[in-house]
Image (cartoon, rainbow, N blue to C red):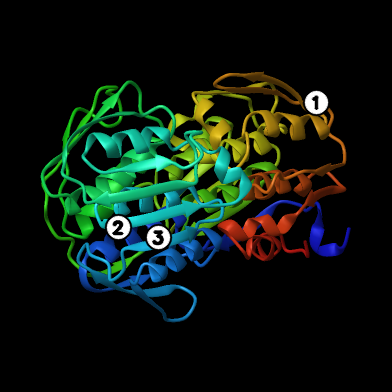
Amino acid sequence: MNETDRIEIRPCGPLLARVRPPGSKSITNRALICAALAEGKSNLYGTLDSEDTQVMVSALEQLGISVDRNGSSQLVVHGRGGTLPIDQADLFVANSGTTIRFLTAMLATITGRFRLDGVPRMRERPIADLIEAIGQLGAAAESELGTGAPPVVINSTGMSGGTAVLRGDISSQFLSGLLMAAPNAKNLVECKIDGGLVSRPYVRMTLAVMEAFGIQVDVAGDIDTDDHLVFTVAAPQAYHPLNYSIEPDATAASYFWAAAAICGGSVVVKDLNMCSIQGDVRFCECLERMGCTVRSMENGLGVEREPSQPLVGIDVDMNGVSDTVQTLAAVAVFADGPTRIRGVGHIRHKETDRIGDLARELRKIGADVNEYDDGLEIVPKSLRAAEIETYRDHRMAMSLALIGLRVPEVVILDPQCVDKTYPHFFDDLSQVTGGEQ
């Protein structure tokens, strides 16, 4: 195994640092869809340049939508007003869930035959509920292999509109994709959620991005609490091109806030605050419950912990901040007492099984872990060196690397998997910790 296949994390002392992670992946890919459906040129500032956004950009370009790059963080999208110059394409989306789900919905509103496929893990990730909803709205899409997972084939003459009943307990990306595509349908679209909705803050994010591009969605019910929500989008209507700035990625920020919790000291993430449209800023509330201090300031959001102040275990429902489960788990192994994480059964369907595989790796470093259908319980024990398998999951690599900031000889295997959302993560971690990783 050569040095690019592994990285040993160096322990460090208390931190005093400021950092600005790259732009939000989730906002970038939503803005790309809205800008592609707009008529005219949109300038997107602060975009993320990573595998997940690169495959979205590449797919749009294959579909005939011009995307110009201006440096590493600006994209200029020449939208075509909900039309395409081609009527067929075969698109590769790697393992980007947002790309395949958002594009599947968008392409169902456009006449043509389109096929979307990805890496082997993508062929295990669910998409059947989105396909069924698209059919209810008068368009045609199918799982090519009949597995309810990609490859997806869309053979459509457009989306007529109407009412779709959609499960919300697998992925909020199905709903987000339909909502963003809905203005390009021929008639009004109504999406009814059957039962609980996971990752509700991401739906709020979708609505915020759509509103910025000129689309209003009517919502019957409280997104934060109600299980039977109804979303109504008038159609057809046009997105407006605009200049749009993208916040730093709050999920990426969670690793640096967690580093302050683990090592002690203070880390401020610049240009984020608790009013962000990204729900993952609420990860700071979990750290506050564990014994940290959270400080909002004019130009950033900081987490502090006095090294003498112990971390305590908590019992927390992380359904709304589920992308930070692995980050909290890295903090939990240093707490006094167990931590129980609930409400996140859907993360088994992510890049990897983020409950089962996370439990396996935490046990390697010495923690006791009890696994449940909806989450896990982490019981801290004496920790030890270990080689951490990442399962090609960027969040596994970034979160469990944090354990090595206090435990010597923690090695992260396949560290380059972070390219999916944060190519320069280990460089930024080195700057924050003041040492070479």
Provide residue 244's location: percent of width, then percent of height. 29, 67
What crowding class fits label 1: few (fewer than 14 Cα within 10 Å), some (14-19), or many (20 or more)?
Answer: some
Label 2 to label 3: alpha-carbon separation: 26 Å
Mark closer to the observer (2, 1): 2
The C terminus - image quarter: bottom right
Residue occupying image coordinates x 71% and y 63%: 430
**Residue 18 sits in which quadrant?**
bottom right
**Looking at the image, how many numbered discs can be counted on the residues?**
3
Label 3 to label 1: alpha-carbon separation: 40 Å
Q: Is mark 2 on a helix, strand or loop?
A: strand
Disc 1 target residue = 381
Q: Is residue 277 visible?
A: no
Label 2 to label 1: alpha-carbon separation: 57 Å
Q: Which residue lies furthest to the bottom in this view?
A: 70
* Amino acid type of the residue tagged 3 in the rendering: Thr
Mark closer to the observer (3, 1): 3
Horizontal side, residue 165 vs residue 247: left or right = left
Horizontal side, residue 256 vs residue 160: left or right = right
Horizontal side, residue 28 vs residue 40: left or right = right
Residue occupying image coordinates x 33% and y 33%: 132
Residues at badges 3 and 1 in contact (C-beta under 8 Å)?
A: no
Residue occupying image coordinates x 28% and y 54%: 209
* Amino acid type of the residue tagged 2 in the rendering: Gly
Disc 2 target residue = 112
The first of marks 2 and 3 along the sequence is 3
Of residue 83 and residue 377, the one placed in the foreground of this image is 83
Q: What element carries label 3?
A: helix
What numbered label is drawn on residue 275?
none
